[in-house]
Amino acid sequence: MRPVPAMEWGMRSKVFPAIALVLALGWAASVRAAQPTPPTPPPAEPNAAGLWEELDPRTHIGAWFFIFEKDGVYYGAMVKMFVPPGKNPNPICTACSGDQKNQPSIGLVMIKGMQRNGRLYENGTILDPRDGSVYNANMEVTQDGQKLKLRGYLGIPLFGQTQIWKRLPDDALAPNEVPANLVQYWPAAPTAKPDKKVKVVHPVPKPQG
């Protein structure tokens, strides 16, 4: 075996680590490529919580309702009414029972006990403040989250009536209109950025005399 010249040996000592580095990088890339790509999580189901508009197609008189969650259960309260001129815009629920008797309709919790199952809400009840009747109820949010199907019924859902409500932006109701009993559940309004202070330059008074 011929002796390896010093120059050639030096070149080999530089080439071998470079080859080893390339092989190592290639092996790491192949390992990463072989690893399965984590599945993309499915989009979140639309939620019923928020502000909704109910409109009676016969009278064109409607109301706004606010649906909120408390301890994993969903409730709904009337927050605004649209009545003909001359009518009481905030009637009292004289037909209600229990602690809701003679309470104002605005802020009255009429939907209770809704348990969520995806876009469907079941095992709830709804109050008719006109006569104090309480019906079984369920709700379903449409796939786009913009409509709510609310069905009240007696006995089984087959014997009932369905209303379709339209979603409203949370800021459609002015903060000063939110009933006091619902303030703690109302979505927090974004904090407004403070306006930049404008420096006022007062004119320098002219010397007297």
Image (cartoon, rainbow, N blue to C red):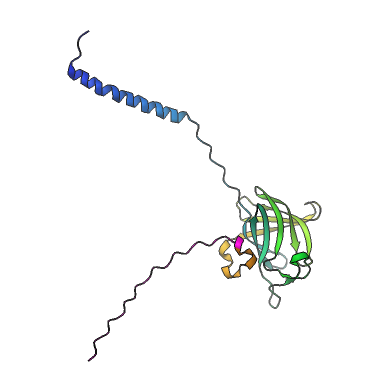
The spot of residue 110 in percent (x, y) is: 71, 62
Residue at 41 percent across and 68 percent down: it is 195
117 over 153 or under it: above or below: above
Q: Is 206 within the magenta? A: yes
Foreground pick, 183 / 111: 183
Residue at 75 percent across and 70 percent down: it is 102
The N terminus lies in quadrant: top left
Instruction: Please identify the residue farthest to the top as the structure is shown.
Output: 1
Magenta: main secondary structure: loop
142 over 170 or under it: above or below: above
Residue at 42 percent across and 27 percent down: it is 30
Query: Could you say which quadrant of the image residue 21 lies in?
Result: top left
Q: Is 192 within the magenta? A: yes
Residue 189 in sight in this render: yes
Query: Could you say which quadrant of the image residue 124 lies in?
Result: bottom right
> In the image, 166: left or right of 91?
left
Residue 179 in sight in this render: no
The spot of residue 31 in percent (x, y) is: 44, 28
Foreground pick, 208 / 35: 208
The spot of residue 83 in percent (x, y) is: 69, 72
Say how many tags the image has. 0
Foreground pick, 153 / 111: 111
The C terminus lies in quadrant: bottom left
Q: Which residues are magenta?
A: 184-209
Instruction: Please identify the residue farthest to the bottom as the structure is shown.
Output: 209
The spot of residue 65 in percent (x, y) is: 66, 63
> In the image, 130: left or right of 85?
right
